[in-house]
C-alpha cells in the first residue's frame, strides 16, 4: 500500500489487530518492508462502549465482552441465553420453559424494589423495548428484546457494568446496559457467502418421579386403613400422563449470510429460519428473520448507512406453569388411573385437572409476533477533527394472541383474541471531536436524543359457539371481555463525554447526561446523571520496565450515577377511568383509579468501581479484577396507605439497596503450537446484596420489610430476596410426627405463621463460568461449564406432589411412599395417622433447597476440512462439521428434589427470585451441524 506523509516525517507507526505495533524509520526512504510479530491479544484492540468504541489499553470502563465464537451454532431460541456464565457479575436465569420467554438477567445484582430489573438492550445503537405486551400466556416476563435476532448476525455483545460505562445512558443505566453489535462488511473485503445448518433433539434434564396407578392405589388403601377410614373402591387400569406429554424435542435451523465490501460500500445480509418443538406437547416456536447492514461512502468525508432487522415469530404456547392448563403441571397432578380417551378413542372430560392431551389437540393457544427495528444514519467529517452524525431509529412490534377452547371442557366453547402494538421512534444527533497533539489525545462527544413510544391493546373474548369448527372469537354468542387501551411515554436527553489521555498512560473520562421523562411530574421531570473515570497504565512507567513478564498493568477507578424510570407511564398523575364499574345508576361516569404524587422522582444508583488489569507473558495470561459498590437511593415502591383514601397503595420514593462485590475474569493461552492449541477462559462474580432501608412496615423482630411472595420478602439488614419461612426439622423416628421449629428454635408439631424466620436468600454468593478450547490440527473441542453457589431455591410445586392426603384428587411423588410405619424408621414422610400428616406439605423449608450447581452447559466437537481438499473445489473456502451437546451433566446437592435448580418463574419481579411452580426444567440436547463459507 502507499501512504502520503509530510517531508519532515521520520517515523511510521504500523500496527494491526493480533500483531505488535512497530516504529519504522522512513528518513530518506520511499519504500520500506515490514514484518509484524503476532501477539495473542493486542492491547490496541477496541471495545464497544456506549455511543462509540475505545482502545482496550486505555479504556477506563468496566466492560465485559462476549465474542460470537462463544455462542457459535448454539441451538438457542433467544440470544439472552448465551449470557449465562460468560461475563463476571452477570446472572442469567431461565424464567420459564416456554420457548421464547425472556430470561431474567441481573448485572451486579438487583438494584430496585418495584422498577424494572432487566438491563437496557441496545442493538446497533437502537435502545430496544422490553415492555410487557403479552398477556399471561406463558412466562412471567415481558417482551424479549433478543428473541427476534439471529445469533449468526451478531459480531459481539458488550456488557456495560460500572457507572463509567453506563452513565452515558443516564436514566436507564442502573441495571446495566447490553450492547449488541451485528456484523458489517469491511472496505475491500472479498464477498463471502456463509451457510450454517443444524438439527438436533432434546429431552428434559430431569422430572419429578410420580406414582403410577398401582403405587397410588396401594398408598390410598394404606392411607384410609391407617386413618380408620372406610375402604374405597378405586378404578382399575392406569395411564402414564407424564410420558404422554413429554416427547422428543426437535430443533432445526438454517442461516445464510453474505458479507463483503468495495472501496466505497460495505454490506452484510443475513437470514435465518429457526424451528423448535419443545420436549412437552404444545410448546413450539418458529422464527424467520432477515437483516441488512449497509454503509456507503458518498465521498471521503461523508457516509450514509442503515441497519435493519425484521422477524416473524409464531408460537404454539402452553399456559403458564402456575395452572393446570400447562401440560407438565397437569400430568404431574392428574390421577394415574384417569384415562384421556373413551372406548371409541374420543377425548373425555377428566374433571378439575383437565385433560391436557385434549386441550393441546383440540384447543388453540397461539402467539404471533412481528418485529421491525433498525436505524438509518448519516455521518459527516468536517474541520479535520470533527464528526457529525444523525441517527434515526425505530422499534415496532405487533403481537397477537389467539385462543380457542372447544365444547369438551366448556359448554358452547370460549375464545379470545388480543392485539398489542408497540411503536417506538428515536433520533440521536451528535458531534464528536478527536485530536492527537504530541502525547495528548482528546476525544469529546456532545449529543441530543429524543425517544417516544406508543402502546395500544385491544382484547376481546366470548363464549357460546355454535360449532367447534368456528375458530374466530367473533362467532361467540356472548361477549365476555371487551377492552382497549392506549398509552405512551417520551424521553428527551442531552449528554456528553470528554476523554483525555496523556502518553497512552494516564486517562481521564467525564460523562454527563440530563434526561427528561414523561413518567414524572413537573417537579422532578428531569434527572441528572454523571460519572468520572480514570486509568493509569503503570506498566508504561520507567520503574516498571524491568518486569518484562508483564506487558500490561493498568489501574482504573470510576464513580458515578445512573437512574431508573421503569415504573409504567404517568404514576405521578391522578387517574380517572370509565367503562364497566364507573357507571352511576346506569349512567356513564368516571371514577378515580390512582393516587397522584407530584413529588415522585427518579430512582438513582451511585456506584464506584476499582479495577486491576494485568496482561503477562506476551498476553498469554490476562486478568481483570473489579471491586464495586452500588447503592440505590429513592427506590420506587408502592407503599400501603389507609383504605379510607379509597386506594390500597401509592407510588413513592423510599428505601435504599446496596450491591457490592468483586468481578474476576482470567483468560489464558496454555499451549500455542503449530498443530495444537489450548486456551482457557474463567470468570467469577461475588455479590452481597443488602437492603439498607424500607418504608415503615415492621415484622415481629421490629424490622421494616416489603413482602414479595408468601415465602419471600425484602427485609432491612437482609437481602432483597430473603426467604422467610417456618423451619422444617424432619420426621421424629420415635413418634412418627413431622416436626418444625417455632420462632425460638423449640420443636413443635403445630407451627404458626408467626414462627417464620429468615432462612436463606435467592441471591447467589457467586456465579460464573469457565471454558476450555482445544484445537488439534483440523479438530476442535470446546467445553463450557457454568456455576452458581450459595443461593436457595423454593420448589413450590412440591406442596402439591408431597401432599399426603389421599383424597385431595392429586397424584403423589414417589418419595411419599417412604412414610413412617414403626419406631426407629428414618422416613421421609410422617406416619399417615399422625396429626401432622395433613399439615406435612405446608409452606416451610421442606420445599426450600440449596440451589448451588456446576453444570456442563455445552460440549462442542468440530472438524474443519483441510484447505488443500477445499482448494480443489475452487468454490468452498471453509467447511466445518460439528456436534454440540447441551446440559449433559450437573453436580448439585444430593438432597435436591426439584427438576432444575435454575429457576425464576416470576420473571422480572425483583422482589421474587428463585421460586418455581412446576417450571419446565432445561432441555438436554444434541445437535449436529454443517458450516460452509463460499
Image (cartoon, rainbow, N blue to C red):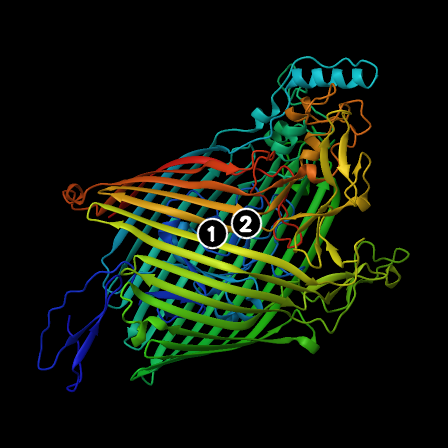
Residue 342 in sight in this render: no
| Percent x, y of residue 637 | 71, 62
Residue at 76% in and 33% down: 739
| Percent x, y of residue 349 | 70, 25
Q: Residue furthest right?
A: 585
Label 2 sits on a secondary structure element that is: loop
Report the residue marked by disc 2. Answer: 103
Q: Is 22 left or right of 721, judged from the image as shown?
A: left
Residue at 47% in and 63% down: 626
Compared to 474, does 820 lie above or below? above
Q: Is 655 left or right of 931, judged from the image as shown?
A: right
Query: Image quadrant for the N terminus?
Result: bottom left
Q: CA distance from mark 2 to mark 1?
A: 10 Å
Q: Quadrant of residue 64?
A: bottom left
Report the residue marked by disc 1. Answer: 83
Residue at 68% in and 27% down: 828
Viewer-proximal residue, 931 or 740? 740
Q: Quadrant of residue 259?
A: bottom left
Q: Residues within 10 Å of mark 2 (few under 14, many from 20)?
A: many
| Percent x, y of residue 504 | 33, 76
Asked whether disc 2 touches disc 1, contact meaning CB atoms under 8 Å apart, the reply is: yes
Label 1 sits on a secondary structure element that is: helix
Q: Quadrant of residue 621?
A: bottom left
Viewer-proximal residue, 801 or 920? 801
Amino acid at each position: 500500500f502507499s501512504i502520503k506523509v509530510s517531508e519532515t516525517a521520520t517515523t511510521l507507526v504500523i500496527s494491526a489487530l493480533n500483531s505488535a505495533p512497530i516504529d519504522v524509520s522512513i528518513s530518506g526512504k520511499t519504500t520500506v518492508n515490514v514484518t509484524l510479530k503476532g501477539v495473542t491479544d493486542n492491547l490496541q484492540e477496541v471495545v464497544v462502549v456506549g455511543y462509540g468504541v475505545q482502545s482496550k489499553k486505555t479504556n477506563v470502563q468496566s466492560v465485559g465482552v462476549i465474542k460470537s465464537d462463544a455462542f457459535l451454532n448454539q441451538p438457542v431460541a433467544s440470544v439472552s441465553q448465551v449470557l449465562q456464565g460468560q461475563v463476571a457479575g452477570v446472572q442469567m436465569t431461565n424464567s420459564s420453559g416456554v420457548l421464547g420467554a425472556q430470561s431474567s438477567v441481573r448485572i451486579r445484582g438487583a438494584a430496585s424494589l418495584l422498577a424494572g430489573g432487566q438491563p437496557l438492550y441496545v442493538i446497533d445503537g437502537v435502545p430496544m423495548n422490553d415492555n410487557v405486551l403479552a398477556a399471561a400466556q406463558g412466562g412471567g416476563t415481558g417482551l424479549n428484546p433478543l428473541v427476534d435476532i439471529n445469533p449468526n448476525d451478531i459480531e459481539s455483545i458488550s456488557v456495560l457494568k460500572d457507572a463509567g460505562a453506563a452513565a452515558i445512558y443516564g436514566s436507564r443505566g442502573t441495571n446495566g446496559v447490553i450492547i449488541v453489535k451485528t456484523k458489517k462488511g469491511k472496505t475491500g473485503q472479498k464477498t463471502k457467502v456463509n451457510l450454517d445448518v443444524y438439527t438436533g433433539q432434546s429431552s428434559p434434564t430431569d422430572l419429578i418421579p410420580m406414582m403410577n396407578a398401582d403405587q397410588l392405589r396401594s398408598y390410598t388403601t394404606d392411607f384410609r386403613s391407617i386413618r380408620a377410614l372406610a375402604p374405597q373402591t378405586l378404578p382399575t387400569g392406569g395411564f402414564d400422563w407424564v410420558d404422554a406429554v413429554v416427547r422428543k424435542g426437535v430443533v432445526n435451523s438454517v442461516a445464510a449470510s453474505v458479507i463483503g465490501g468495495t472501496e466505497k460500500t460495505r454490506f452484510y445480509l443475513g437470514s435465518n429460519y429457526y424451528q423448535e418443538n419443545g420436549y412437552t406437547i404444545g410448546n413450539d416456536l418458529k422464527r424467520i428473520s432477515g437483516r441488512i447492514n449497509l454503509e456507503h461512502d458518498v465521498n471521503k468525508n461523508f457516509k450514509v448507512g442503515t441497519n435493519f432487522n425484521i422477524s416473524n415469530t409464531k408460537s404454539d404456547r402452553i399456559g403458564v406453569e402456575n395452572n393446570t392448563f400447562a401440560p407438565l403441571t397437569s400430568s404431574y397432578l392428574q390421577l394415574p388411573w384417569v384415562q384421556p380417551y373413551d372406548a371409541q378413542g374420543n377425548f373425555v372430560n377428566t374433571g378439575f385437572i383437565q385433560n391436557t392431551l385434549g386441550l393441546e389437540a383440540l384447543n388453540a393457544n397461539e402467539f404471533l409476533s412481528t418485529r421491525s427495528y433498525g436505524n438509518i444514519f448519516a455521518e459527516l467529517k468536517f474541520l479535520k477533527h470533527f464528526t457529525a452524525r444523525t441517527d434515526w431509529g425505530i422499534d415496532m412490534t405487533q403481537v397477537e394472541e389467539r385462543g380457542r377452547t372447544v365444547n369438551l371442557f366448556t359448554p358452547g366453547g370460549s375464545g379470545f383474541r388480543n392485539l398489542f402494538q408497540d411503536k417506538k421512534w428515536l433520533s440521536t444527533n451528535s458531534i464528536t471531536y478527536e485530536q492527537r497533539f504530541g502525547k495528548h489525545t482528546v476525544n469529546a462527544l456532545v449529543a441530543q436524543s429524543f425517544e417516544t413510544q406508543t402502546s395500544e391493546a385491544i382484547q376481546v373474548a366470548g363464549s357460546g359457539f355454535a360449532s367447534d369448527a368456528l375458530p374466530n372469537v367473533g362467532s361467540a354468542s356472548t361477549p365476555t371481555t371487551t377492552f382497549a387501551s392506549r398509552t405512551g411515554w417520551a424521553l428527551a436527553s442531552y449528554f456528553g463525554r470528554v476523554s483525555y489521555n496523556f502518553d497512552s498512560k494516564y486517562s481521564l473520562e467525564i460523562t454527563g447526561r440530563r434526561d427528561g421523562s414523561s413518567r414524572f411530574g413537573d417537579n422532578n421531570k428531569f434527572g441528572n446523571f454523571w460519572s468520572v473515570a480514570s486509568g493509569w497504565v503503570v506498566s508504561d512507567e520507567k520503574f516498571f520496565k524491568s518486569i518484562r513478564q508483564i506487558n500490561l498493568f493498568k489501574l482504573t477507578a470510576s464513580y458515578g450515577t445512573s437512574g431508573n424510570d421503569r415504573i409504567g407511564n404517568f404514576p405521578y398523575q391522578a387517574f380517572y377511568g370509565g367503562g364497566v364499574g364507573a357507571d352511576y345508576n346506569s349512567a356513564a361516569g368516571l371514577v378515580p383509579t390512582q393516587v397522584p404524587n407530584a413529588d415522585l422522582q427518579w430512582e438513582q444508583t451511585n456506584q464506584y468501581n476499582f479495577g486491576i488489569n494485568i496482561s503477562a507473558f506476551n498476553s498469554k495470561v490476562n486478568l481483570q479484577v473489579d471491586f464495586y459498590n452500588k447503592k440505590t437511593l429513592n427506590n420506587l415502591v408502592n407503599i400501603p396507605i389507609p383504605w379510607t383514601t379509597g386506594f390500597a397503595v401509592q407510588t413513592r420514593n423510599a428505601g435504599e439497596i446496596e450491591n457490592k462485590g468483586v468481578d474476576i475474569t482470567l483468560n489464558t493461552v496454555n499451549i500455542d503450537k503449530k498443530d495444537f492449541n489450548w486456551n482457557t477462559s474463567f470468570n467469577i462474580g461475588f455479590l452481597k446484596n443488602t437492603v439498607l432501608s424500607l418504608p415503615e412496615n415492621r415484622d415481629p423482630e421490629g424490622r421494616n420489610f416489603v413482602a414479595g411472595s408468601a415465602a419471600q420478602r425484602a427485609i432491612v439488614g437482609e437481602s432483597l430476596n430473603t426467604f422467610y419461612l417456618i423451619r422444617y426439622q424432619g420426621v421424629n423416628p420415635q413418634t412418627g410426627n413431622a416436626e418444625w421449629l417455632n420462632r425460638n428454635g423449640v420443636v413443635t408439631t403445630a407451627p404458626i405463621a408467626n414462627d417464620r424466620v429468615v432462612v436463606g436468600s435467592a441471591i447467589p454468593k457467586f456465579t460464573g463460568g469457565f471454558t476450555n478450547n482445544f484445537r488439534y490440527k483440523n479438530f476442535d473441542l470446546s467445553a463450557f461449564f457454568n456455576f452458581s453457589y450459595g443461593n436457595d431455591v423454593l420448589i413450590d410445586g412440591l406442596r402439591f406432589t408431597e401432599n399426603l392426603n389421599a383424597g385431595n384428587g392429586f397424584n403423589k411423588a414417589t418419595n411419599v411412599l417412604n412414610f413412617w410405619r414403626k419406631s426407629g424408621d428414618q422416613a421421609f414422610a410422617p406416619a399417615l395417622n399422625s396429626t401432622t400428616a395433613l399439615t406435612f406439605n405446608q409452606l416451610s423449608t421442606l420445599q426450600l433447597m440449596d440451589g448451588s450447581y456446576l453444570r456442563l452447559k455445552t460440549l462442542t466437537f468440530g472438524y474443519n476440512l483441510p484447505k488443500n481438499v477445499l482448494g480443489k473445489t475452487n468454490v468452498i473456502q471453509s467447511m466445518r462439521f460439528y456436534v454440540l451437546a447441551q446440559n449433559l451433566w450437573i453436580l448439585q446437592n444430593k438432597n435436591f428434589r426439584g427438576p432444575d435448580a435454575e429457576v425464576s418463574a416470576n420473571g422480572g419481579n425483583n422482589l421474587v427470585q428463585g421460586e418455581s411452580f412446576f417450571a419446565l426444567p432445561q432441555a438436554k440436547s444434541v445437535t449436529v451441524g454443517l458450516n460452509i463459507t463460499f
